[in-house]
Image (tube, rainbow, N blue to C red):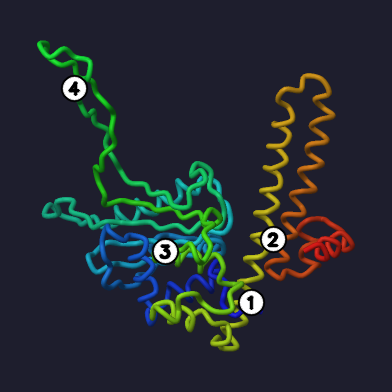
Amino acid sequence: MSVFVNPFTDFGFKRIFGQEAHKRLLIGFLNALFEGDFVVKDLVYRDKEQLGETKHDRSVIYDIYCMLDDGSSVIVEMQNKKEVNFDDRALYYASKSFASQGEKGDAWRYGCASVIGVYFLNFNQEGLGDAFRTDFEITKTRKVFAHTAFAPKWRTPIRFGVPRRVPFAKRLRMVFLQMPEFTLTEAECKTDLEKWAYIMNHMEKLSTIPWAAQEELYEELSKVSSVAALSQNERAVYEENLRQYRDNLATLEASYLDGKNDGLEEGRKEGRMEGRKEGRMEGRKEGRMEGRKEIVRNLMALNVSDEIIMRSTGMSLDEVQKLREEL
């Protein structure tokens, strides 16, 4: 088993970010995420049940709900399984948390503290492109007028409007982090956010936590996330979480394979008026083989057994063992 817990599992994510005794880890991450914007000095964990999650939702979505020292609420989620309308779901729960601040009576004047949603995505979400980080907030569009360069000096300059988006209400914000899009090496990581992202992406494969010798926060992270420090019961829970995570990953990879096949099919369709059907079948076949190999490589990197790989991909034992020899 790995030296450190997998942070993309329910157990691992909460172990790192969801413990009152080690809340400085979450504080450190949030300060790295919002560096230059605001500083978190303290936070209090809140009961996430008031967000109305169902038992089914909690099996695939891992929430941390806290209140910062300035009264702002922060929802931190780990999502490792694609979900229909996930962006709408994120907006719904952030809005619900914002609206829950309403008070009865005429004395209330709609004053509300900020609500910020932070979403770790262990996959690529449609609409976010290839960006590692995408921030959303409510903005307004206004036209900025400027003098034209070609207007004669003796005439009134012609002005034109340039649409520009400016913040309108910063009290409702969402930040999406697409973890597969973070590709910096350890040596290339300079900011604290880059260091956090690198550790999260590689933690299960690391033998030591980088920067732990130089920075106390990462030393604490090394101790908290150590598998050797888990009790017998904690280890049993973690191993079950890890199994669920790998099953989710296999499902996600299969979904990616289907999408890749469709993309190959469409690509071969363009510019080929004759032999279209034959090209589609060939493209589908090639895409399926390459996709399966990619799935197998990813699962092998996670030390998944041959039996689970066979069940997830439909490949024979000989095919799986042959790919394992090629790695």
Whole-Å distance between the Cαs marked 4 and 3?
41 Å
Q: Which label number is shown at residue 12?
A: none
Q: Residues within 10 Å of mark 1 (few under 14, many from 20)?
A: some
Whole-Å distance between the Cαs marked 4 and 2?
56 Å
Residue kind at label 4, given as amino acid type: His
Whole-Å distance between the Cαs marked 3 and 2?
27 Å
Instruction: Check if mark 2's residue and mark 1's residue have beta carbons within 8 Å.
Output: no
Badge 4 or badge 2: first in the primary sequence: 4
Residue 278 position in % (x across, y down): 84, 29
Badge 3 or badge 2: first in the primary sequence: 3
Question: Which quadrant holds residue 140?
Answer: top left
Residue kind at label 3, given as amino acid type: Lys
Residue occupying the far right of the picture:
318
Badge 1 or badge 4: first in the primary sequence: 4
Q: Which label number is shown at residue 147?
A: 4
Q: Which residue is mark 2?
A: 298
Residue 66 position in % (x across, y down): 34, 67
Q: Which label number is shown at residue 239?
A: 1
Question: Which quadrant holds residue 117?
Answer: bottom left
Residue kind at label 2, given as amino acid type: Asn
Q: Which label number is shown at residue 190?
A: 3
Q: Is residue 55 left or right of residue 269?
A: left
Image quadrant containing the C terminus = bottom right
Q: Residues within 10 Å of mark 2 (few under 14, many from 20)?
A: some
Question: Which quadrant holds residue 274?
Answer: top right
